[in-house]
Amino acid sequence: MLTSTRNADETRLEGVMSAIRGRIANRTLTPGAKLPSIRSCARSMGVSKSTVVEAYDRLAAEGVIRSRPGAGFFVTAPLAPLALAEIGPALDREVDPLWISRQALASGSRMAMPGCGWLPASWMPVEAMRRALRRLSRADAAVLADYGEPLGSPTLRTLLARRMAGHGIEASPGQVMLTDSGTQAIDLLCRFLLKPGDTVLVDDPCYFNFHALLRAHQVKIVGVPYTPSGPDVARFAEALDRHSPRLYITNSALHNPTGAVLSPAVAHRLLLLAEKADLTIVEDDIFADFEVEPAPRLAAFDGFARVVYIGSFSKSLSASMRCGFVAAPRGWIDGLTDLRIATCFGGPSMAAELVLALLGDGSYRRHMETVRQRLSASRETVGKRLKKLGIEPWIEPRAGMFLWCRLPDGLDASVIARHALEHDVVLAPGNAFSLSGSARGFLRFNVAQCDDERIFSVLEKVMCAL
């Protein structure tokens, strides 16, 4: 009994010390910050005051904190390097979004990658890009060697404004800034609008890199359940009241990972709620060109009163020559431009010229027509093969590359992903996309990456074994 009690006391002591170290590691407690009082720490952690006293004494002995008589305990450890994997809930590495991205990006040709989020290189207009690059090689020296304009190519920005008008979005070229990618656009907006500790709403599930990027900005992330017609409006309103968020980041068309499309009724209600709560919405529309029939756009309904619109060619054209853009209220552009100069100086000059060339000669339009046809055929074929294994799509998407699929009852997607990786198949388990961890029975499949027979044989083998 004495040994058992001693072990329990030691465990509680280690728990307090681990919690303090964790808050220092994730920068909740920074150098010079005051620790909670002994009484409040004991109350919040459900331990005795003597346990907290001993924990603080040991941390002081390690040099992590120090006591100031009559004032309390303060952090003395240096500012911890930002480790994104340590921020947020502890996850199996097979569910950790950064881990999944590393596996997919570094896998090479030996791996089958139904869990990745991009088209195969063989689907891209490589020959058209080669022709455009040959033309680009004869451009002025400034295009090849100099910094690009901070806002980016005026010609491309004008063309992008015309393309947005096709979705009912009215933006002048002066409201458009080119970026290196959609991810960079969101990063700049976070720098521009957020401070550590602010709250951001995301869909649950949502694109898993939103989680990682927002954690890098040290904000609080709150998930709102997603439905086939958009976020659950009642839960969205509840989150606004409870958390007073600064931003909401979403895909209104071809939602990642579900493939769902925002309905006009939900879009209208979201904008009314955003107006009342003074909420800014970041509409990430990088899959716009994969649509067959255009879906409603929040930016079209809103007119940039509180919606910021993002696009990119990284998914549709080239992940190597990256080019994206952000369209924002006119009064924000100077501030965003200053941030772009501060963080990466010039605009994406060569990538912008490549995109402009392919848009201008019709190559991009023809390429996307082919991609949409191939994706339609692949969604049907892959969907049938998955159904034979008992894996059912959550919805039947109208377009795009993703199928968000429910596993048979009792199966855990992260366990299946772990075993599939042993057979060189990279899957994307549902909880990588779910902030609440409520998608353990789901997998996201990229139908464009499912032409490898190993995928289905490995799935069948692993599922039978489990």
Image (cartoon, rainbow, N blue to C red):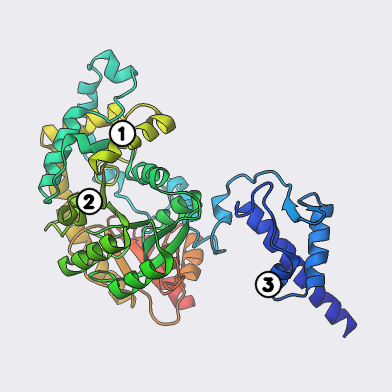
Residue pointed to by mark 2: 305
Q: Earlier in the sequence, mark 2 or mark 1?
A: 2
The circle drawn on residue 45 is 3
In this view, 158 is above or below 301: above
- Image quarter of residue 49: bottom right
> Looking at the picture, how far across and down is residue 94, in whole percent?
51, 61
Residue sitting at x 49%, y 49%: 216
Q: Earlier in the sequence, mark 2 or mark 3?
A: 3
The circle drawn on residue 334 is 1
Amino acid type assigned to the residue bearing label 1 in the image: Asp
> Looking at the picture, how far across and down is residue 96, in whole percent?
50, 59
Q: Is residue 458 visible?
A: no
The circle drawn on residue 361 is none
Other-residue count near label 3 (Cα within 10 Å), few / some / many at <14 / 14–19 / ≥20: few
Amino acid type assigned to the residue bearing label 2 in the image: Ala
Q: How far is mark 3 from mark 1, CA to CA?
A: 47 Å
Q: Are marks 3 and 1 in contact (CB under 8 Å)?
A: no
Q: Is residue 24 visible?
A: yes
Q: Residue furthest right?
A: 2
Q: Nearer the viewer, mark 2 or mark 3?
A: 2
